[in-house]
Structures are given as C-alpha cells and as structure tokens.
Amino acid sequence: MSATLQPYLLISTLLLCLGLYGVLTRRNLIAVLISLELILNSASLNFVAFGRFHMADPSAGQVFAIFIIALAAAEVCVALSLILLLFRQRRSVDPASMDQLKG
Amino acid sequence: MNLADSVFIGLAVVTVLGALGAVAFRALFYNALSLVLCLFGVAGLFIYLHAEFLAVMEVIIYIGAISVAIIFAIMLSRPMDKSDEPRSPSASLRGAVCAALVFAGLWRLLSGARWAQGSGQLPDMRDIGKALLTTDVLPFEAVSLVLLVAIIGALVLSSPRERS
Amino acid sequence: MDLTLLWTIQLAPLAVFALIFILPKNARGIAPLLGLTGSAAAAVSALCFLLAHAGKAGQPALHYSVDWLTIDLPAAWPLGKAVSGTLKAGFLLDPLNLLMITLVTVISFFVQLFSFYYMREDESRPRYFAYLSFFSFAMTGLVLASNLLQTFMFWELVGLASYLLIGFWYTKPSAAQAARKAFVLNRLGDLGFYLGIVILFVGLGTLDFTGLGKDAVLSALGPTLAMAAGLLVLTGVMGKSAQFPLHIWLPDAMEGPTPVSALIHSATMVAAGVFLLVRAYGVFSASEVTLEVILLLGCVTGLIGALLATRQRDIKKILAYSTVSQLGLMAAGVGAHAPQAAMFHLTTHAFFKSCLFLTSGAFIHRFHSNDIWTIARGGGRKDLVPMLTLTVGLLSLCGLPPLSGFFSKDLILEAAKHHGLAAFAACVAVSVLTAYYSFRLLFIVLFARPTAGHGHGHHAHGHDAGGHHEDLLGGLSRALPLLLLAALSIYAGFLGSPMTHSPILVWLGGHEAHFDPAMAVKTLVIIAVGCAIAFALHRDPDASEKKLESSKGPWAMLVDRRFFIDDAFVWVTKQVGLRIASFFDLMDRWLVNGVLVNGTSYRIADLGRLAVRLQSGSLQGYLACGLAVLAVTLLWLTGGSSR
Amino acid sequence: MSVPPIEFPILSTILLCPVIALLAVLLTPGRYTTAIKLVSLVASAATLVLSIWLCLAFNAKDPSFQYIERLDWVRSYGIQYANAVDGLNVAMILLTAIVIFCGILVSWGVTYRTKDFFANMLFLVAGVFGVFMTTNLFFFFLFYEVAVIPMYLLIVIWGSTNKQYAAMKLTLYLLLGSALMFAGFLYIYSLPDARTFDLLAIKQQVTFSPMVQNILYISLFVGFGVLAACFPFHVWSPDGHVAAPTAASMLHAGVLMKLGAFGILRIGVYLFPDGARFWAPTIAVLALCNIVYGAMVATQQRDLKYIIGYSSVSHMGIVLLGIATMTVSGFNGALFQMFSHGIMTALFFACVGFIYDGCHTRMLDELGGLSKTAPRISAFFIIAGLCGLGLPGMGSFVAELLVTVAAIGTYPVIGITSLLALLVTAYYVLSAVQKVFYGPENHHHKDFKDINGFQFIPRAVLVGCLIFFGVFPQIFLDWVNASTRALLGA
C-alpha cells in the first residue's frame, strides 16, 4: 500500500484542499498563513512521492522539497513580520478588511 | 495488512486530521498545534518514501523553526488571536464548495493519469548532497540569498521604529 | 523707372506703417513726420507719373503682373466647362487709375498734413498715423490692381483700415460699435462681390481688367449670367460706396477722427465703389438691367442721403449724408452710361468734400463741438480761413459756376436727362436738396448771434479736446491743407469744362463736354430755389433750431429715424439671425451634446455601475471565484479527456 | 530655389528630435526647470529648421513619395516602420514644427510640474510627427494613439474649466474614432490580396470593389471625421479647446484636428477614390453644417475660448468642404486651410491663454478695454481674428478662396450658402473684439501686464507665417499641387 503513488496523492490532495479551504475562509492572517503551510506541504509531499516512484533521477524530488522547505521558512519569516506590522498599524488582521484598492 | 501498512495508514490519518484541525479550530493556538501534528505526519510519510533526510529536515525546520515561530508570533501578540471573528456560514460554504470542487477536479485528473516509469532506484543522501552542489547549485545559492534577504527584510519590517 | 515709381507709391505707406510699430516707445514722437514723409513720397511719385503720362489717352501706361495663384477645376458650375486659370498680381495703369491714384495720394498727403494739427494733443498719435499709412497702402493697392481679385483683396484691406480708424477712439463704445457696423455691412456687400468674382473667373478664366470688356463678358457668360455677375459685383459697390440700403454705416463712421472722415469716408475709400463701377464698366455694361439697377440705386441713394442731410445738426453728419447723396449721384451717372462724368464728379467731389471735412475738423477742434449751432454761436464766422473754405466747398457742392461741382454735376444731370425723365427728375431733386442743406449750413453759421462762453454744445466731443494755443507750425498745418484743397476744388472743375475742351474726359476716353446754356440756367435756378428755401427757413438760426427741436410730424419722425432702414437691419439681425443662432446653440447644447453625447456616456456609465457590484474588494472572494473557475475548467477538461 | 536633396534620413531625424529631447527631459531632475525648457526649445527649434530644410529640398514636381525610409518591425504581419514625404504631408510637418516651436515658447511660464508638462508636450509632438510621416497603417494607428494619451494628461493636469469632463470626452471621442479607423485597417489587412499594413503595397496590390470602397471609406471618414470635428461629432473639440492649457490648445486645435482631415486624404481618398466620390455630396452637406452651424453657434458663446472652439469647427468645415469637392483646387484649398487654420488657431490660443492667465477670466462680459491695458496682445488677437474672418493677405483668405471656387463650381448651392459664414464669422469675431478689447478700460484688469519681448517672439512668428503664405500662396500650392493631382488621378 505504501509502495504505490496513489495514497500519497490522495493525502497531498486532501492537504491542498484543506489548505485552500483555510485560505478562503479564515479571517485571521496567521490562520491563513498556517493554511498556506499545508498547501506547501502537500506540494513537497507530491514532489517526494513522484521522485520516489516515477522519476529517473531519484534525488530530484527531494531536492525540490528541500527548496520548498527553505522557501517556506523565508516566506513565514517575512509574512509574520508583515502581519505583525499590519496589526500594529491597523489593529486588524482580517483579510476581508484589506480592500483599500476598491474603487 | 502488515504493520508497515497499518502504521502508514495511521500516519496518513494523523496528517489529514492535523490538517483538518489546522483549519477548523477557531482558536489560533490550536490551529498551530494541529499544524505541528500534521507536519509530524508528513515527516513520517517521508520516511516511507525513503526520504529520511527530508523527514529530519521537516521536523527540524518545519516543526522546530517555522511552527514554533508561528506559535511565538501568536503568543507574543495576544490580542491578535482574538480578532478571528466568527466565520459567516456563507463564507464557509463558499470555501467548502470551492475546495471540494478543486478536490474533485484534481482527483479526477490524477486518477485518470498515466505516469512515466521511474527508475526504481532508491535515493541516497549522498546523491542529494551532490545534486545540491553540482547540478542544482545555482538554485541552491539563490535560495540562500532569498533566505538572507528574507531575514533582513523581516528584521527591517518588524523593527519597532516609527515610520512616517 | 515707371515701375520704381509705382512700387514707391505702393510700398512707401506700408513701410511707414511697419516702421511706426517697430519704433521704440520714446521715438514714437516722430511718427507724424514719418507718415507725412511716406505720403509725400507717394504723392510726389504719383504726380511725376501723372506728368509723364498725362494726355496719352487710350493706351494703358503700364501693365505689369506676376503669377499669384493657380486654380483649376473640372467641369465647374455654372458653365459646365473645365476651368484652369492663373490669378495674377500686378499693376495695370491707365488714365482712369492714374487720375485716381493722384487723387488718393494727394488728398492723403493733405489729410496727413492736417492731422498734424488736428491730432497734436492725442496720445495715440503714432497709432493714428500708422493706420492712415496703412489705409494709403491699401487704397493705392486697390487703385493700382491689375485684376478684379486683387482689387477685392485691397478692397477688404481698405475696409479694415476704415474699421480701425472708425474705431480709433475705441474706448468709446459708440466708436467700437460703429466700426463693427461698418465692417459687417461692407462684408455683406462683399459676399456678393466675392460670388460675382467667382462667377466671372469660372466663366472667363481670368480676372484681368484688360480681359473684362463688355464683349468678352457677354460672350463668355451669356446675358443672364452676365447680368447676375454684374449685379453681384454691384453689391460690393453698394457696401463700399454706401449705396441704399447699405448706406447706413457711413453716418456712423463719423465716430472716427475728422481727418479720417475727410480722407476715407468722403474722398477716397467710399469713392472706390464708384471707381470700381467705372473700372469694371465692361462687367456692368454687359447687361442693360444692371445699369438700370445702378441708376435706380443711385437715384434712391441720392434722394435719401439728401433728405436725411436736411435735418441734421451735427456738421459731420450733414457732410456724411451729403457724401451718401453725392455717391448716389455718381452711381446714377454710371447707370446713365456716363462713367467718365461719374469719374469726373468723383474727382471734384473728392477735393471739395475733403476740403469741407477738414474745414469741419478745424471748427470742431476749435469749438469742441460738432453741433452747427454751437459752432455758429461760438463765433465760427470769425474764423476766417475755415469760413472761406467752407463757403467755397459748399458752393462747389451745390454746383455754382464756375466752381468745380458745377461742371461735374452738370455732366451727370445731362446724362440723366438723356437717359430718361424719371432719372433726370431725381437728379434735379437731389440738386435742389443739396443746395438747400448747403445754404442751411452756411446761413446758420453766418447769421447766428455769437454768445459768450462757447464750447458747451449739445454734442460736446470729449476726445477732440485741445488747447487754443496755436504756434506757427500748427497754424500752418491747419490752414495750408484747407486753402490748397479749396484751390484745387476750384481748379479741378476746369479740367472737365468745355472752355478747356475737357481734357480729363477725353483722357478718360469720353467725349468733350459741350456748353449748354440751358443746362447752366437750370443749374442756377436749382441753386436759387435751394438757397431761397434755406434763407426763408434759416435766416434766424435761433428760431430754426427751436423749430428743428419741436417738429414732431410724421415726416420729421421718418427722417429722424433714418427711414427705419437701420431699424430694419437691427430687426433682421436680432430677430432672424441671432434667433437662428441661438436655436443652433440650444440644439448643440441639448441635442448634440446633451442627448447624443452625454446621453450615450450616461448609459454606458449605467452599465458600468452594474458591473461594479462584482468588484467587492474582498481578496478571499476573488480567490474563491478564481479557484471555482479553475476547478470547473479542470472538471470540464478531465471530463473531456476520459471520453 | 534649388536646394540639393538631403542625404540622411531626414524624416526620422525630425521624429527623433522630440523623442531624444523627451528622454533628456525625463532624465533631468525636475528642479532644473530652465534646463528642461531649454532642451525642449532646442529640440523644437531643430525640428523647425529641419522641416524648413525638408520643405526646400523636397521635390515638388514629383507627385510620388520621397525620402522613403523603411525598417521591418514585424515582417510576417507586414508591419514596417516606414516614413515618406509627399505634397500632402510636407506642409503638415512644417505646420507641426512651427506650432510646437511656438507652443514651447508660449509655455515658458509653466511652473506647475514643469518637467512633466514639457515631457508630455514632446511626447505628443512625436506622435503627431509620426502620424504625418508614416506610410504604414499600423504605425499610423500607433502614432495616433501616442498623440492622444499625452493630450489627456495635459488637459487633466494643467487644464482649467471642467477639465476632467473635457479630457475624458476628448479621449473617448478620439479613441472611438481610432477604433473605427483601426477596424478599417484590420479589415484591409485581412483581405487575401493585402496581408500587409503598407499603404503603398495595399494601393498596388488590392482592388476594392465599389461596395467595399463605400463601406470602408465612410467608416474611415467617420473615424477621422471625429478628429476633424466633423458635424455632428464636433462637440468634443470646443470643450477640449477650452479646458486645455494654452500650449496644448495650440497643438490640439492647430495640429491634432488636422490629423483627421489629413487621414481622410492620405488613407481614405488614396485607397478608396470611388468611395470618396460616392460619399462626397453627403460630406459636402455635413461640411456645410460645420461651416454655417459652427459659425452661428459661435455667435452665442460668452467664453472667448468657446468662440474660438466653435470657429475651429466652422473652419474645419471648410477643409471638409474642400475634400468633398474632389477637385484639385478643393484639395489644395483644404490643405492650405489646414495649414493656415493651424497657425491661426495657435495664435488665437496663444493670445487667449495669455489673457486668461492675466485676467483670470475669459468671459466676454467680464473683460473690456484690453486694447488700452495690453495693446500688443490685443493686436495679435485682432490679427488672428482678421485671419479668421478671411481677410486678404492672410493665409485663410487664399484657402477659403480655393475651396469656395471649387465648392461653387461643384456644389453651387452648398458653395454659395457657405459664403454666409464669411458674414457670420465677421460678426462674431468683431463682436468679441469689441467686447474684449474695445470699450472703456475695465478697472478689474488694470494691472494686467502686456506681453514682453520674449513672449512676443512666438506670436510674431505665427503672424509672420500667416502673412507670408497669404501673400505668396503659390509657394504652398507648389508643394501640394503635384500630389493632390496624383491623388485625384488628374
């Protein structure tokens, strides 16, 4: 069972969709960030799974996953500081309230 | 069903449940804890995929650094987690429908797909190290640069000085 | 040599005009001198030319032209033949305009000289002399032009000069108004002129005066079109030469400085119309109808002008209406197949009328009033030089032998008599009226009892104000032009008199005049009648003033309202022209701009307002939409691929 | 006068002058206003000199295109950067150069966002030059759009009186016109014989059936007619004129409106002569509306700029009438009128703008006696007005003469009716002059300063041009005659 691709794909798709659900519904940016982490994880899971089963170069998938983790770290670090800054300035981290560009 | 499979199923369930908790709880702190749970599950799955190095990285970086940073952020700015206003049913429904649609679409795509045959070789940590320093050295260095920039950026952004 | 002289005549005034505007502010004081020099140069050149060519009848002295503009048209209306012609620019000099150019430059010189005195206190003197020079330039251009289009161009330019000079004291609203009126009415006449030129050009392919003979016009255009062209060109003449019903601008034009009235609005520019009648006689004589119309217009104009002159109390208005009337007489002369007589009368009229206007200027300048009673009571009759020239001018105007008016008017009367009884009667009536208003003016100035404290007339002219101190130069520039012009208005008559075998008429291509004793007697009777009436009514100026003020009969009203011609024009402009314009304006605002343009944009804005609702500004909403579309697309594609 | 042919790509050089100046201006920090103005002035002076040189070196006897420059851009779609000059555009190039030169001088006093202002002006002029020069339909469209956008900015940022509305209206109108025009271009391109945007190639390769000619011509005519303020698409132009800042008004009325009429001749009549003949009577009627209706409406205006705006509508009608006659004289007259009207309105706006800056009003009733206060600016305005009413000796007179002769010869009734405008024009011009410049001095404007020697220059240049071409019209006609003849196949 763990030797085929399908279960991994199912898990990663579920992670992706749960992450999407979070991004779409949460009204706190940190929660949105958490949901984004889920999406990123689903992607790296996919990469590793495909690398394991369906790729000529076995290390390629893992290298990608490493990059994803590194970028996720960078992303979180910037995003968190942005969110904190936003909270400091507007006392709100509700993405629905960020509509200043609306005409 | 052998032990490996049952552990695999257990890990899968933990992962998905953790993910569910990460989006479903209203309290931000619980979300973060659920995320940690989910990430543990993913790390376990990595082991099943013979990506032990990655599993370790997942635990050290994702859980040890990223999640902890999120938790710190939540705890350091207490009033923020209170600002999660109740979700409106229509918004929840909208999100659920969208996610379900995407899931349906993807699943149909994936289940119908035929994949190229892999080499079947098991990856080695040595290969990864080699790849990072040979073929992938450019992206590797780029990522290091990105990290540096992100750190500096985060410092600049969160420095408490007043802006005009 | 000849050409150099012509260029001098033509360009010297223009150079002065330009020079005065280029002059630095502190050097503008020499402007009068410059103007005088320019006009003197032109006058001397013209006289040299005249002396060199006088007497050589028939032959044009000079014909010089260069190509100016080419026009070609395929199959043009009204003749349906292709037209390809070159419009030329150049000089055509024959006896007719040699006479005219001499007249123009000489009178222009005298007027500039007189202006030296008249405008000495005015601070915008440089502008005045510049305008005068510009007028001289345009007028010489008009006279020297070798073709009809060139004439038209300078015709408009003299109109401009007249506009500028009438509105010289532009801070006075009435002057600005009169200037506009003059220009627009002239424009009205010029429209017809313009159209006539186009028809002539399309028909003949040339506008050169040498090619505009009667036979050429007739054969190219046929009788109907020839008549149309003649009548159309005539409308231009009506505007410029103040013929009925376009004469109404001329009295108003007296708002300008008096020397201008002398130069432009009596002697030269307004005579340009009559000059054109003679110059393009071929075009008019191509149709008998045109000539009849000219005769009719001339008689009507003469009568109206003379009638209106009888009830004026402003000396310039009297002279202005007299000019209208005399111009009518000249036109009648042309209409009665006597262009040479008309031209002769134009010449003599130019001298005596400019003399009269300058005289009136001398009075006005001294007595600060245009009102004849004020002038008279102020002691006008004691001012000897003007009194003398006034008498000479007025007697010449009524045609007392042997003054110049006698000879020229006689010729026109004779031509009218040949032509028909009605025309003759009209001309006689005009003459009687002329004699009446001339003597009326003379008697009032002569017989009025001087009172102390003059200078506060009914129509005090603030702008003509000036001191009484007169040095030698001022006195000379006041008296010299008056006396010389008076002398000329005596002398000019002999050029056309039977005693000297009328050299001017022969030179212009006409017949020698014959002395007709019966005619002379008739003239004397006419003058006597006019004089008698004037004496009866005006031997007591105070009484006649009271009578003028108190008369309220229908006739008085008719004359005082100028036969309602002005009112008719105002009515047409206001009630028809401006009504249409305001209707168009409303249409532009409401229909074109409001309904069509803004309406369309509002409807589009309404559509946009519907679309705006989609733009909620919610990021998550946008994302949801995008994802939903993505998912549906995915489902659709995979659905397709599985089949 | 024989000037040897020019050896270098003169047209591109003319086009590059404003472009290089634009780059230079953009790179200069905004606080060096004098440097910015000088760069713009030098560039416009260079274009002026080069244009005059072009006019002299241009072989007027040759009706075909000269100084052809080609550079493939997108070869597979037949899009070429291609410039050429013939009788139709040589004078328009000169006109543009004169107007921009004077426009830059006139806007010397701009203080608000100087850098942006001059950058926009140069951008606009580059577009206008491009439209006049190019022989490629795609680039025609491109340059046209390039000219429209800075116009919008110029009006919105530096304009006055309801400027948002006017700018939006102008832009929408012009884009509407260009959309129609571009649709026509694309249709031509899509024809199997064509497959190119090159004007000359299209003319040689494609034969249009009468029906197609009729449809394409009227579509192009409406597209260009909008720009030429053809009735009933004229309402944008008075509003735009009024709102635009002085120099922009000069360019707008002086040059931009001419683009439309030029396009009709260059593309419409050139490609679809039969279509042009078919529609000519209709266009003549519209042109008559322009002439008389525009003049009539002008009599009712109270704002000096609106008067000039409607007089432009009236005068552009003369251009359209000349085109509608489909005769050599008519075309010559139309081109002449484009030229002299361009210079004349530029002069008008140069004067009105100055008066507005000084008196802060353009209403006839609030002005008065300006001749006393400011004799020079008044003189310039009156000269422009006299040119407007077709005084002989000025360019407009000759233009109107040519058009009128052609119009009376072709459409007698329309031609004769159009003469009415001469009277109406005289009426409204002189009424405006009477109200604004004559009459007693208005104490509100006592401290209104007349133009100084420097500001005298641009206006004097314009007057000089008007009089020069009014007195020597044949010089102009020699430029255009061969090409208009060829255009009509005569």
Image: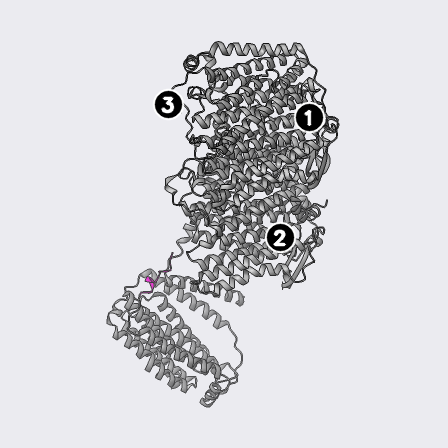
Of residue C323 and residue C226, the one placed in the foreground of this image is C323
Of residue C525 and residue C551, the one placed in the foreground of this image is C525
Amino acid on which the number 2 mark rests in the picture: Tyr
Q: Is residue D231 visible?
A: no
Query: Relative to C60, is C154 on the left or the right?
Result: left
Q: x, y percentage for residue D224?
A: 58, 47
Q: Is residue C111 visible?
A: yes
Residue D193 versus residue C202 in the image, above or below: below
The label shown at residue D187 is: 2
Q: What's the CA distance linking mark 2 and mark 3?
A: 89 Å
Do the residues marked 1 and 2 share a common chain? Answer: no
Q: Which region shows up in magenta? A: A94-103
The label shown at residue C281 is: 1
- The chain containing the residue under callout 3 comes to C
| Number of marks drawn | 3
Rendered residue at 62%/58% (across/down)? D11
- The chain containing the residue under callout 2 comes to D
Q: Quadrant of the C terminus of chain A?
A: bottom left
Of callouts 3 and 1, the N-terminal one: 1
State which quadrant residue D422 falls in.
Answer: top right
Amino acid on which the number 1 mark rests in the picture: Tyr
Main structural element of the magenta stretch: helix, strand or loop?
Answer: loop
The label shown at residue C453 is: 3
Q: What's the CA distance linking mark 1 and mark 2?
A: 60 Å
Q: Is residue A101 magenta?
A: yes
Contact, mark 3 vs mark 1 (Cβ under 8 Å)? no
Do the residues marked 3 and 1 share a common chain? Answer: yes
